[in-house]
Amino acid sequence: MTTPNAACSRCGRLRATETDALAALAWACTKDNGTERWLCPECARTHTRDIEGKLPDEYW
């Protein structure tokens, strides 16, 4: 389920302020213990290694 009023968990940027539809689609969502967390495109690019590090070994 998408959350239009989501805020980036790293920098606090609001998804609702995106004026470009493609930029709004570039947001990344993760779930940790049932908690939904969002990352804006810039923070997602910056923290890609952190995101990949959470993937199970079976993924690779």
Image (spheres, rainbow, N blue to C red):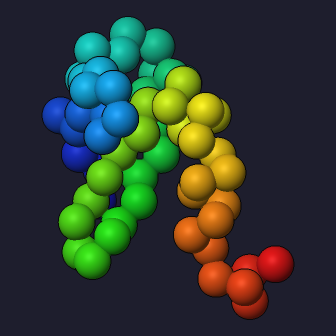
Horizontal and vertical percent for residue 17?
A: 27, 15
Q: In the shown orientation, is residue 59 left or right of residue 28?
A: right
Q: Quadrant of residue 59?
A: bottom right
Quadrant including the N terminus: bottom left
> At which x and y percent is residue 46?
61, 32
Q: Which residue shows up at 29% across the image and 22% down it?
A: 13
Image vertical order of residue 45 relative to residue 19, above or below: below
20 vs 56: above or below: above
The answer to whether any part of residue 39 appears in the image is: yes
Q: Quadrant of residue 14?
A: top left
Q: Position of residue 16 (x, y in %)?
A: 24, 23
Q: How many marks?
A: 0
Is residue 15 at all visible to an observer of this figure?
no
Instruction: Locate residue 3: give its quadrant.
Output: top left
Look at the image and tell me in which quarter the C terminus lies: bottom right
Q: Left of 36 or right of it: where is 52?
A: right
**Left or right of 6: which side holds 59?**
right
Q: Along the line of sight, which residue is nearer the eye, 39 or 10?
A: 10
Q: Is residue 20 above or below residue 42?
A: above
Extreme residue toward the top, this view: 19
Q: Residue at x 46, y 13 (%)?
A: 20
Name the residue at 54% across, 25% down: 42
